[in-house]
Amino acid sequence: MAIVVGYVPRPEGQAALDRAIEEATLRGTRLVVLNVSRGDALVDPRYASAADWDAVKAKLDASGVEHEVAQAIEARDPADQLLRVAEETNAELIVIGLRRRTPVGKLIMGSAAQTVLLEAEAPVLAVKAPKE
Amino acid sequence: MSSTPTATATQKEGRSEYGVALLLLVLGGWAIVDGLSLTDTASRGPVSAKTMPIVVGVLLVAMAVLLVIDLARGGRGEAEGGEDVDLSHGSDWRTIGLLVGAFVANALLIERVGWPISGAILFFGTTFALGARHYVRMALISILLSVGSWYLFFLGLDIKLPVGLLKGIL
Amino acid sequence: MDGINALIDGFGTALTPVNLLYAVIGVVLGTAIGVLPGIGPAMTIALLLPLTLRLEATQAFIMFAGIYYGGMYGGSTTSILLNTPGESASVITAIEGNKMAKRGRGAAALATAAIGSFIAGTIGTLGLALLAPEIVKLAIKLGAPDKFAIMLLAFIAVTTVLGSSKIRGLASLGIGLLIGTIGIDRSAGGQQRLTLGIPQLADGIDVVVVAVGLFAVGEALWVAAHLRRGHAEVVKVDGARMGREDWRRSWKPWLRGTAIGFPFGAIPAGGAEIPTFLSYALERKLSKHPEEFGHGAIEGVAGPEATNNASAAGGLVPLLTLGIPTTATAAVMLGAFQSYGIDPGPRLLSDHADLVWALIASLFIGNTILLALNLPLATVWAKLLNIPRPYLYSGILFFASIGAYATNTSAFDLWLLLIIGILGFFMRRYGLPVVPAIIGIILGPVAEYQLRQALQISDGQLSGLVNTPFSVTVYVIAVILVVAPVVIDRIRSSRAGDGDGDGTHHVPHLTPQSANQEGQ
């Protein structure tokens, strides 16, 4: 059993990570942190830089929870990758960050979060970044 | 570098380079045959209509021969690099096939169904070929681009692209 | 000093609100395109040709001027922010610029590149304005044999200097000449040549279709077949702007870079990678901080960037005075002139003085706009890199198709575009440089015409080709261009003790494999 969190180097990703650490501490389970990208643009702001990724690892080490981190660039959809990892690790909870969006914006942009919510077997905890 | 074949993979690639020589030979032969079939009436001086095709044909045939010699001695054409080019894997023929397919569809359809539709098919098809899978977003951008460009050409540049099926609507 | 007066008139034309707007559009578009991976200025101008053909020639060229400098600048912005093997001319900038950015000196690197480009571009354009009328005074006296000799020199130079294999360069030139021959031979008898009986080919293949096919479709197919996955990391631009010390270390490299770049750009087949490399080597030698080179030395950004832009300005000298393009971008611009029915060459400056001086004036203006826009906007440009590759390359194919169709509103051109695009793909695949082909297509018919003229004047005597001191000199230069590398190669290989093919080996760093890319 594990908690799987999809991390993005943004406020909502940060919020998701913080919340996932809390949950993992409470439940005493292993935490799997995932940062994935389709790798189809020259630059993907959702893909953590080396420095950023180090900060995530440092935070996890400091929290004392048992954890595992994985970063990957794969042709498939990031949501699918998250779901697959959740299945493989037999996740009891998936934590994702949610951007604040209007319904129309959502329609045009599609969303990884939606795919995860619709297709995940495990319960999904969706976290938004705190309002400024 | 081009002159040092290393792995067997490059050797296999090398064989297909003889195809380039063959293409040059065919093009050169065509130019020479076509040049010889011309009559040189109405031209003053030694440079008639024939001269250019024959000279170019001879150049191409000569390069075909030299290329074969170069290849036999182990020369290799250097594939072109670039910001977004990853030469570590071979050419992705499936993507190329799909792209050409979308292109051909546009060429066949443009005068039948009009640019707003054929252009959208072109854009949708090429983004699909290149690996995008957000179908809603792809469709919206495709339609926006093809209809938008139709209006841009019509209103801004006074070029009437085929309107086809959407006649009367746009 | 008649150049100066004409230039002032040119500013009068270029500074009208509408023309200024086109200059801004050109600069913004050029920079955006230069930043985007896989799209160079040559492709941009090719893609815009069909759109601009409805504009007045002056406005189109004002816009092209903006794209010309903007594209170059955009390329260097990306190479500082990301360490990508970009356009051949900015390879050197990437070495030191990216290292500087990683050390937190990104803002200073961008600034020295921007200011250096501005200074070099301005001095280079001034050089162009002063030099062009003088060269034209000489060039106007040239007869058909001289012009033919110059074209032959251009052919030889572009095939031997660019790219690593002469055979492949010449093969590419041959393909270009072949395509250029297709159609009715207008000057001798009006027979159809190489048309296969297809009526649409009787008028020849439109240069727009060829340029778009080779540079846009061919390039997009090539990149699509080898699409890179994964990311480059954008370095955050922060840290201090240029300090006093940076200025002190930059101004000499800027000026030296300009001095190196301009003449290299001005000689046919100059290209930008050799002079930028020279500038880098020179700065490294002269620097008081040679230990910093390779770790982000500001001189290593300032010098090559200035060189790069000065050589772009220099490249316009042979284009505007002799009608000889030295780079892919210049070749496409020459195609644009032809599409407007304007024949670039010695008469251009007298027949279309307004156009030329407006173009030169807008180069100055574009340069200034670039400096004003780019320093504050660098991070905005970097956002363009987030566009997913599928949309980017689909966009290229989309605009290529619409442009080719709109040129003659005929679906036949779409088929031609596809065939030429596939040809462009295989040329890139097998290392046949694209630039000799496009130069062959554009200059081939002109060269044929000059040859015919020369031999008619001499009544068929071949000596008619070498009866002027000028043409003899040009042929001597051409022979040196062919023989010198072979001799150098022999000497080098006899020292190294390995006999090797046709001189395909070369100095590794000096000619990056992107040498035949449509760099600038």
Image (cartoon, rainbow, N blue to C red):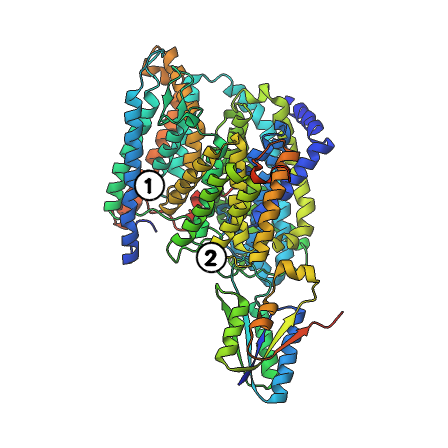
Toward the viewer: C221 or C117? Answer: C221
Q: Residue at x 47, y 33 (%)?
A: C267
Toward the viewer: C183 or C96? Answer: C183
Position of residue C154 in the picture relative to residue C86 (left or right): left
The picture places residue C10, in percent across and down from the top left corner, at 67, 27
Does C470 sit above or below residue A61? above
The picture places residue C518, in percent across and down from the top left corner, at 48, 42
Callout 1: chain: C
Query: Dot 2: within a 10 Å radius of its alpha carbon, few (fewer than 14), some, or many (20 or more) residues?
Result: many
Image-quadrant location for residue B134: bottom right
According to the picture, the residue beneath numbered tag 1 turns out to be: C488
Residue under disc 2 on the same chain as residue under disc 1: yes
Residue furthest right in the image = A132
Q: Residue at x 52, y 35 (%)?
A: C405
Pick the quarter of the image with the N terminus of chain C. top right
Q: Would residue C306 be visible to someone looking at this image?
A: no
The picture places residue C450, in percent across and down from the top left corner, at 42, 19
Q: Residue at x 34, y 39 (%)?
A: C166
The dot on residue C228 is 2
The dot on residue C355 is none
Q: Residue at x 69, y 62 (%)?
A: A103
Q: Would residue C49 be visible to someone looking at this image?
A: yes
Helix, strand or loop status at disc 2: loop
Does C96 sit above or below residue C324? below
Number of numbered discs present? 2
